[in-house]
Structures are given as structure tokens and as C-alpha cells.
Image: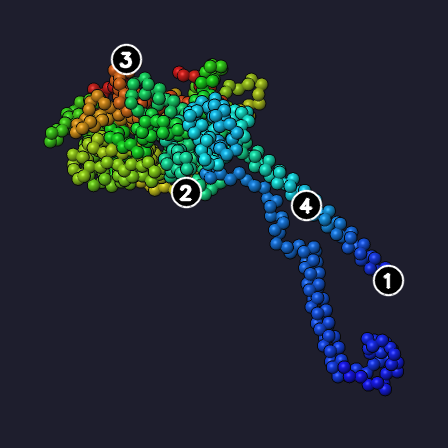
Amino acid sequence: MKQTPQRDPNPCRPRHFRPAPCGPAPQEGPVKHSLETSHTRLIITGALIGLAFTVIAGRLVDVAAFKSGDGRVARNVATTRVETSRADIIDRNGVLVATTLGTPSLYANPKELLNPRDAAHKIVQVLPDLNEQEVYAKLTAEKSFVWLKRQLTPRQVAAVNRLGIPGLEFQDEDKRIYPQGNALAHVVGYAGVDNKGLAGIERGFDEILRSRHKPLELSIDLRVQAILRDEISKQMKQFNAVGGSGIIMNVNTGEVVSLVSLPDFDPNDPGATPTENLFNRVTLGTYEIGSVFKIFTTAMAIDNHVTSMTGGYDATRPIEIGRFTIHDDHAQRRWLSVPEIFMYSSNIGAAKMAVDVGGDRQREFLGKLGLLKAPSFEIPEIAAPLLPNPWRPINTMTIGFGHGISVSPLQIASAVSAVINGGVLHRATLLKQPADQPVSGTQVMSASTSLDMRRLFRLVVDKGTGKFAEAPGYLVGGKTGTAEKVSGKSYNTHSLMSSFAGVFPMNDPRYFVMISIDEPHGNSTSHGYATAGWVAAPGVSRTVERMASLVGIAPIDEDSPDVRRALAITLPPAPGRKFASN
Amino acid sequence: MIRPSTVIWLCAVVAVGYAMFQVKYEVMQQEETLAKLNKQIAGGREQIRVLDAEWSYLTQPSRLEKLSDKYLGLTGINSSQIRSMAALPERPDAPTALVSNRSFTPAADDFAAQIMAPRIAAVAVTSRADR
């Protein structure tokens, strides 16, 4: 340290007061330098701190006054919804047909149990289907988690809770529930324990059901479904049949309103049923449908101008071709007009009609109606038709009256709907279509052909083979079809497939209704007959009568001039013509 | 020496701090209530789902039909029991302008369809007895 003694006015002052308290001390050299440095540092630090405070203040004003925060605080206010692993399925009126519920499953933590012997005894008392030995073994296992029973009912949960045993806990697991049971088994299908769809809509829409929350709306009307199922099972019981199937379709949209295949199963427990009951006769079964096919033969002949409503064919004698003989079941043994061929279901007439049209045009026409390939539909249980290969002239003939080709009832439904609704083929669907939008379709025949077919349909029920399908006021029309089932390599005259394909009301067609009864046995009520007119037609009649008011179809006066004009047929006079009474 | 402004600021700090914590605790409490309510809502919704399923189960058409047969003895609607308005006989003193004699007018059919609205008719179908 360097000092200048003569400049110090008070030599005795404490040495640490430097520079002097009063009077500006001369600053120079290193002192001045270090003062300046610290001054600069102070300014910089102050400025930085000031800046930081400004930023904080700015942010405060920003958050408080302008609310430009990211809203993280407010986000958890939104209410939580019930998250399920699969969307519900409802019918067209909103009735629940499949839902997922959290079902509690019982598990135990053996390490927390005080008295496993006593606990096992008590548990088996409230859950009798468990085995006490097994439960005891589980409760004494060296684990901290063992399942005791999966998916308990609320009553069982209450009973277990009442035991008050510490160490027993519940965990919710998702379970698929089908509250309507058997009624929609073949449509909805079922899902397995791991929530994977295994059949029906559950499988066809597996991905969609998993990813959405909105319920899936089916085209099915559950009330109509119950009616159809009831009527088919009544017919099956009455005629001691092995099975039955039915389908109701909206002819103007292709919506399937009801689909029944009996015997059926409980989708809540599909494992408990024989495998053959899982078989969907409507979509996966293909059948030689018999005379119902004459609908297509007749429509084809009229649409191709091969014949007309006033034309006809000679059905006096059976047709002999190769080793086959084609004869009529309701033989009239005379010339028959086209309406007569249809109403008496003449095989000879239909075969001749088909031959006149020719194999190529027949194939083209049936192809346009979607009868030659597997239909596209929402459930995976879909069968492709069985077709003759090659398509010989004899096949053209037999297909004319519905033999030698096997199609599913679903295909028949779509095709007949097209024949009757004005000639527009709609894709069959199980999903509800919006009512305000026109449904797309392809024109497959002329509207005038379709009008002729409506008259023929009505004629069958009015005067032909389908009289028992009549439902007063609802103008049912349709076609019977009784086919002998193939057993081995030949037809079995005693095992029949009796079907009635009906449409109502014929003056303004709305619904297609078809019932097929598999292997019916005639009895005294049917005078021993097991044919479609006796077995399937009455079921259609009652179904129509019961469902009409539900779907908003008012009964009409069949004798009103408008209706008569719309459905009139002039049968050409034929010698000795008389109407059969069957 | 403590200047008056310092005193004011200190008071302000204490007041703001107190208010802030007050608000904070209130928010915490509200959030707790909210979480509880949300849980209740979720529980309620789960309950509704269970009840929906039970309702659907208990109103199976086949079950209702059985119950109706057992307790009500009603039969299904016959087509002869349904008439359009136009088909009803005129009331003698009714103003004739309101009632049309034409049968099957579109309006009358609409009305018939309306009175047979599905929900009302549901009662009828489920009460049908075997015939």
C-alpha cells in the first residue's frame, strides 16, 4: 500500500476510513479502476434483473388480463364418458340388442387371507358352482393374485360382499350382453370373451364396433323379427319339420327388416348349443328353391318379349328329355296361358318358356338379378350359389322351374324385390338406411314387366297355389315353391323344402316376406300335404297380418276400383278351363 | 426508517398472498367436488347402461306376449278392426264440408298410418294371443 504522508490532514484517524469521509478524495490509479468496474457490473446486473422482472410482470398481465394461457387448468373440467371396448348395437327403433357391461370378477389375495379353510367353505356356500377343494388350493397358493370366478351377477357380488372376508376383491371386466337372447342370434352373431367378434354383425363390423362410441343401427325391426320367428316355429312344430328360415325385406330399399333361421341359439352362451344351430340358413344355406324360381323365368320371358301376358304354352304332355321327364304337379293337361302357367305352377310351361328365352339370355338375366354370384352383405356367413357347369340346355329347362341351381334365401329376397318394385335391384343390407335419401339401385328390367309380375303374384294368392297366404285387406301376392331335397345323387320325394315368397301390398309393394320350412311332414290338418301352399303360405299370411299395422300399412278394400284396375288380369278363354281348388 | 410506501407495499403483499392462497384452496376444493361429480356421472351412466340392458331383456316381445296371454287375454289387431277416417259414417249434425265421402283419400291413409304409429302398435302386437 502506498500513501502520501504530507497529504493526510489527520494522521491519527483510523486507518480503515479511506478515503477521507469528507471532501472528495482524489481517485486515481487502481482504486479508480476497480470502482469503475464494480459500477459497470452493478448496472449490468441491475439491468438484467430489471429485465427479468419486466418479463414476469408482462407475463402476469398477459395471463391475468388477456388469458392467453394454454388452458391446461381448465381441461380436466370436461366430464368423462363411460368408455366401453365395443359400441352397442340397436335395432331400427332403438331397442338395445347388444351392449357391453363392466361385469365384476372375483379374485383373492391369498397373502391377506386370515383363514383360508373357513373362507373357502363360505365362498362355496354363496357360489355353489365352485369346488371347495379347488378354492382352498387357490387360497393357499403362494401368490398375491388368484382368479376365483369370472363375471359375477350383481346378486352374487352382494352375497360375496356380505361374507366380509378380507382379501377378496372384485375387478371389472367387459362382458358382451345380448338382452334379446335367441331372437337376433343369426343377425347379431356373438363376440368371444376377449371381445372379438366371432359371427354375424359382431364379426362383420368387428373393427368398426371397437373404434366407435355411437351405437350401430340395424335395419331389423325387433317386433317384426319376433313375429316372423314365432310364425316359423309354429309351422315347424305343426308339420314336425327339422328347420325353417324366413326373411322380410323392404322391397324399395333392400333393408332386411327380419331374418330368422331356426333352430337358433343364445348368443350369450354360444358354446352351449350344437354347432348346426349356428348355421345361418338364410345367408349361408343354398337351396334348390323349386317353383319360386318361376318368378324369374316368367319375368325373363316377358322382359325379353319372348312371350307376354296373353301368350302361352302347351302343357298337355310331360316333356321327355334324355332320361328325364318333366311333368306338372298340378297338371291341367292342356294349353296354358302365361298367367295360368304361373298360378298352377306348371313345370312344363316354365321349362318351355326358359327354352324359348335360351341359355345365354337366361344366364345374363339371372346374373343381372345377382343370382349367379355370392351377394355382398354385412355378415361374413355368406354362401355362393351352386351353378351347373357347363350350362346345358337341360339345365336351362330345369332352372326354369328352380331345379339344378342352388341359391340362398337372401339372394331370392333381393331378386324378387327387384322383380316386383319396378325393376330396380337394391343391395341387401342389415343397416338402417336414412329415410330421406333415395337408395341407389340398378334397373334390371323394365317397369312394365314388373307391373305384369305384380298381377301374376296376386293371381297366385287370389286363385292359384298360394291361397292360404291371403291376409284380408293386405293384398298379399307371391309364389309357392316345393322342392325335393337332394339326398345323395337323386331327389328324395319325401324330404321337401317348402317355401312361399310373398310380397304385400301388391298394389304398392312394400315388403317381401319369405318363409321356408325344411322337411315338413304332412298331417291331417293339411290332408297329408307338405307342399308350400299348405306349409309355408299360412305362416306368411299370419306374419303379414300381424306385422302390417306395425310397419304402418293400412288395410285396403280389395274390391275398390283402383285396386282392381291395378291388378286385373284377363285370362284368355281356354276350352274346359277350370280353376284348381288346391 | 420505514417509509410509508414500504408499509403499504408490505400490506399489499400480505393481502395478495392471502387472497392467492385462498383462491388456490378454493380451486382445489372445487376440483375435488368436480372429480367426485364426474365419478358420480360415470357411475350413473354405467347404471343407465345396465338398466337399458335389463329393460331390453324384460321387454323381449316373446316375453311380453307370454305375460299378456297370461294376464290380459288380448288378441292381435284384425284388419277388419282398422278403418280410415273417410270410411266412418258421418255424424248427422256434423258440418258436411269436413267429412269427405271419397274413400281412401291420401289424407285418410296418412291418418291411418299415423294412428298406427309403431310405438302405440307395439302394445298391440305384444298382446297378441295365439290364433
The subunit letter for the residue under badge 2 reads A
Number of the front mark, 4 or 1:
1
- Residue B32 lies left or right of residue A446; in this view the side is right
Number of the front mark, 4 or 3:
4
What residue is at 54 percent from the left and 30 percent from the top? A166
Number of the front mark, 4 or 2:
4
Whether residue B36 appears in this view of the structure is yes
The image quarter in which residue A4 lies:
bottom right
Name which residue type carries label 4: Val
- Residue B128 lies left or right of residue A70; in this view the side is left
- Mark 2 to mark 3 CA distance (whole Å): 52 Å
Mark 2 highlights which residue? A207
Q: Please tell me how crowded label 1 is: few (under 14), some (14-19), or many (20+) other residues with Cα within 10 Å.
A: few
x, y percentage for residue A322?
11, 31
Number of the front mark, 1 or 2:
1
Q: Quadrant of the N terminus of chain A?
A: bottom right
Pick the residue in front: A118 or B94: A118
On residue A524, which mark appears? Answer: 3
Mark 1 highlights which residue? B1
What residue is at 33 percent from the left and 30 percent from the top? A278
On residue B27, which mark appears? Answer: 4
